[in-house]
Image (tube, rainbow, N blue to C red):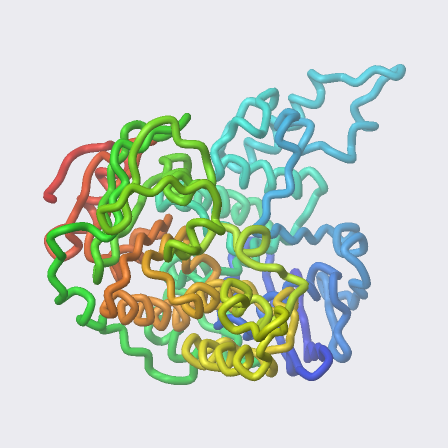
Amino acid sequence: MSLLELVGITKVFPGVVALKGVNFSCEAGEIHGLVGENGSGKSTLVNIIGGVYKPEFGQIFLRGKEVSLSSPASAMAMRISILRQELLLAENVSVAENILMGQMRKFRANGLLSWSRMQERTAEILRLLGHMIDPATKVGTLQHWEKRIVQISKALANDSVILALDEPTSTLSSDDSHRLFDVMRNLKKNGIGIIFVTHKLDEALAICDRITVLRDGKVVDTVRGSDIQTKDVIRMMTGKEVDFEQAPEARKLPETEAPLLEAVGITTNLLKDVTIRLYAGKIVGLVGLVGSGKTELIRAVLGLDPVQKGTIRLRDKVVALRSMHQAKRLGFGYLPDDRRSKGLVIRMTIRENITLPILSSISRVHLMTNEAKEKQITLKWMQELGIAARSSELPVVNLSGGTQQKVVIAKWLADESTVLLCDEPTVGVDVAARIEIHRIFRRLAATGKAILWSTSDLDDALDVCDRIIVMRKGEIVNEFSTALTSKAAIMNAIVAGDSGNV
């Protein structure tokens, strides 16, 4: 008897059938992977398990008994927790207060709160995960993976027996991901059923007992993680063979004598005398642990964060950027790390988002937009990037995370930016879409654009970049040619700051 079983689940939204007769189960003490392309139905299925959506048809069983998950509260009451990518934690209070939030009454006696009992209970929960964090520590001082542990501990404090982890490693380094996997294995030993939603197929194959593949709202198959290879999962996800060969055109171009963009001696509260050079026709990777300074460097170059010292030259001309509007006029494009809050106006349509940076160039007199031109440009980039939507008039809030990311990319491609600064450009994007995005950026480099590609995924950087810069504690510790180095050498530089071949 399964801990959780879904039978014949069908979910319909206006104009689209999101799930079609889906069968899915999760056993106690199992890590069950859930994979598929963006728009395959993963998020919808997880939201049904979490009580956010109610299916039109189908049954849900918990320990063999049919249940109705009519709301998130009802799912939590049945000890089911959905842990989102976003870490919704109170940064200014302690680990113990975050984990036991909503349960404070249990630790009151004669009107007084017993901090010692709270800390004991917190330590007890953390021991289940195999990682001890001081219960008195403020959450805001923790590393990202430690915050993920606090998020999981909060679910365990509510006696959850089923945890659905939605892309928990999307912003973690390789080492931090493996720490999280140790936590998941400890949960498995304690009989917790874990649903692991991920785009990182190598992780799914390494950690999952079983993997269910969704495509177009249907289950393609459920297989054992030890019995299948990455290429087989991709074929099931996409329905076709995917060519992993890299397009060589960008890599063949020689660097020009002068860089297209040069940032020299950039110093901020975190960055320490950082210098980078971007050349036309080249993609430069920027890698490092969380807090290494990758995001801060991009924001400093764009003028989004104050710079204490340093010079930025574009085509050998000194520029002093003070706003994104000014940067855009000079030919800069920016793909931010958080697409929802920084990269999109989520209540606006696909068309409105893609053409937002170029409205002035496609407007008629009296600021009247040329709608025909707008639609032409939008449809071009929707087709180029494979943006899966039935209409360009759909609000982007209704799109999957990976499709939203494609809209952000399309926005800056439509603007024909010369220098593209990309912060986690493939986060939350499925494997087939990532391969296509890599090809698109190589083609862009081949047209003479200079691209900075900041990522937490080293495989991502190795696949697309010509050179890789390693940052650590606000400094550049090394730079590698991807053609002349190894993943191990770069990882060593990331973790230890050691030198390697350049």
**Residue 76 falls left or right of residue 454:** right
Q: Give the camera-side residue of 214 and 129.
A: 214
Q: Nearer the viewer, residue 200 or 253?
A: 253
Q: Residue at x 28, y 62 (%)?
A: 449
In percent of width and height, residue 234 lies at 38, 74
How far across and how far down the image is residue 494, in percent?
27, 39
| Near-viewer residue (76 or 425) | 425
Q: Position of residue 156 (x, y in %)?
A: 65, 41
Q: In the image, is 95 to the left or to the right of 249?
A: right
The answer to whether 349 is drawn above or below residue 261 in the figure is: below
Q: Quadrant of the C terminus?
A: top left
Give left or right: position of 180 versus 439: right
Does residue 466 appear in the picture of this structure? yes
The quarter of the image holding the N terminus is: bottom right
Q: Quadrant of residue 232?
A: bottom left
Q: Tell me if residue 470 comes above or below residue 328 in the rendering.
A: above
Q: Nearer the viewer, residue 409 or 7?
A: 409
| Residue placed furthest toward the front | 365
Q: Is residue 182 above or below residue 39?
A: above
**Image quadrant where residue 364 sits:** bottom right
Is residue 473 visible in the rendered image? The answer is no
